[in-house]
Image (cartoon, rainbow, N blue to C red):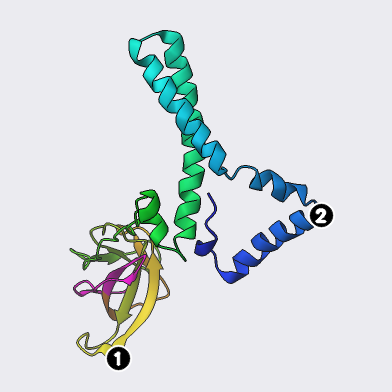
Amino acid sequence: MDNITLLSSAEAIPRTAAVVVAISKDPSLYTLVEACFPKQQELQEVDEEHKAAFSAAADGDPEKAKRLKAARQKLDRKFSIFFTLVRHAAVEHPELLEAFGVPAAKTRKAPTTPALTSPQNPRAKHGKNTGEIELKVNPIKAAKSYDISCCIGDPSIEANWRHCGVGVKAMHLLVTGLVPGTVYWFRVRAIGANGPGPWSQYVTLMCV
């Protein structure tokens, strides 16, 4: 079911405009929707019909059980719409929930995203081609990709580090364009839905 509150303004505008245009072209469309809103008499009738069918079906007669099922379906249909309307009206008139005995809608908890941990057991080996080094780390749950950073010189100085690659497979992170004969230090971090996690320990290798 569409929930316009979840849409951005840019997304909501064409949705709402389409409704307004459709009703302007054919007002009977709104009448069809409005006809589904249960009236007071309809609620009373389906309530009485259901109670009568329930009492009649107490003897276990199959035909009466079928009539009870049909009456219950009609009851569910009408009152479900009514309760939904009550919850919407209760945004401005909260006393309606208590008056009609309607429980407040349950708030869905957003799924929690596991915190990313530092990739463990970093390894480095020479790639198939000159100027390539392949890195491996143990996979991190909830990681969407892996960020690779490298440095030449003292790895304890943060300014020496630069971004040098990204990959999606923890066991195959290829760094290319390196200078043969140069000693590189590498570190890897996981990237998840909420951003990056902590860096791994350093691993070093001379490029060939």
Callout in the foreground (1, 2) = 2
Residue occupied by mark 2: 25
Instruction: Tell me the element at label 2.
Output: helix
Q: Quadrant of the C terminus?
A: bottom left
Quarter-wise, where is residue 7 in the image?
A: bottom right
Q: In this orientation, does residue 130 appear?
A: no
**Left or right relative to 105: residue 37:** right
Depicted 148 relative to depicted 144: above or below: below
- The relative height of residue 71 versus residue 24 in the rendered view (above or below) is above
* 200 magenta-colored: yes
Q: Quadrant of residue 173?
A: bottom left
Q: Secondary structure at mark 1?
A: helix
Amino acid tagged 2:
Lys
Residue 107: image location, x then y, percent: 35, 57
Q: Which residue type does callout 1 highlight? A: Ala
Q: Which residues are magenta?
A: 187-208
Image x and y of residue 23, in percent:
75, 55
Q: Which dot marks residue 159?
A: 1
